Amino acid sequence: MKPAREHLRCFVVPEAWRGAMLGVDETEAHHLVNVLRARLGERVEVFDGAGRTGLAEVAVIAKRGAELRLLEEQTRPRPAPELILVQALTREATMDFIVQKAVELGAGTLYPVLTERSIVRLTPDQFAEKSARWQRIALNAARQSHAAWLMQIAAVQPLGHLLQTWAQPDFWFVGSLAADARPMRAALAAAREQQPRRVAALIGPEGDLTPEEYRAAANAGAVPVSFGANVLRADTAAFYALSALKFALTD
């Protein structure tokens, strides 16, 4: 069977996978037809963000949507262990970049958190707007990286609230500049022996976490970990942390 054109990939929400015909909403149809230039009868890779992928062909193009005829499908298991990034809010462009690269590196969940030294200060009215923006960026990154699972982005919340309410990972660490922070290699070697199902990294803002925030994270089970002698930017630290977790702990 003729494969889909390279980079021709379409997101179809899980509830639209009903039988042989897949309904594509207006926004995704616009991207497929006007951005990717898909035409009737052309093969398209499809995914639902929850592990299901497949090959389809464009059957209908309308003003407010499109329909695809499903030709084959398969399900990919959720990556194990689940990678979680707890990221203190940074400047908008930096945060956008972190969201994009977290998807590419296989993060399953992103928790954006407010910290004492975060430069960005959002009002509650801005939370939904930011979350919607990050979800769009995550979807675009999933299309580009051929991810089968769409990264989930939690609501913006204070770090202290998250530490008190979330389901803690089996293993997680906080990037630390403290002299007694554990070397990354040693922390990951110990974690690998536990065979954790959910792992996480907490990355502070440009101005770093406060001593109180470090203590709160440690009291909640986070291992203070050193990323080396150099001081990393917030985005670099996030990518380093996810890459290290992925390399050391995923299959």
Image (cartoon, rainbow, N blue to C red):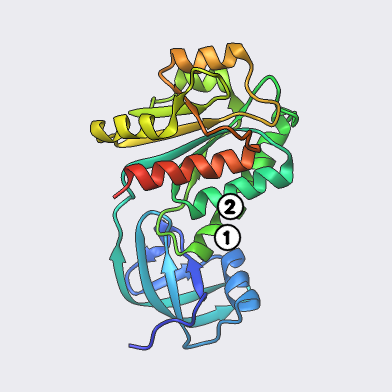
What type is the residue that disc 1 sits on?
Asn
The quadrant in which residue 95 appears is top right
How far is disc 2 from disc 1 in space, using C-alphas?
8 Å
Q: Earlier in the sequence, mark 2 or mark 1?
A: 2
> Residue 97: x percent and y percent?
64, 49
The quadrant in which residue 209 appears is top right
**As rendered, which of 149 and 13 lies closer to the eye?**
149
Q: Which mark is residue 120?
A: none
Name the side, left or right, on which 90 lies relative to 109: right
The mark tally for this picture is 2
Q: Which residue is mark 2?
A: 100
Identify whether 227 is placed above or below 27.
above
Q: Which residue is mark 1?
A: 140
The crowding category of the residue bearing disc 2, from other C-alpha atoms within 10 Å (few below 14, some 14 to 19, many at least 20), is: many
What type is the residue that disc 2 sits on?
Gln
Confirm or deny contact between disc 2 and disc 1 (CB under 8 A): yes
- For image coordinates 51% across by 51% down, the residue present is 103
- For image coordinates 37% across by 64% down, the residue present is 17
Identify whether 221 is placed above or below 24.
above
Name the side, left or right, on which 69 lies relative to 228: left
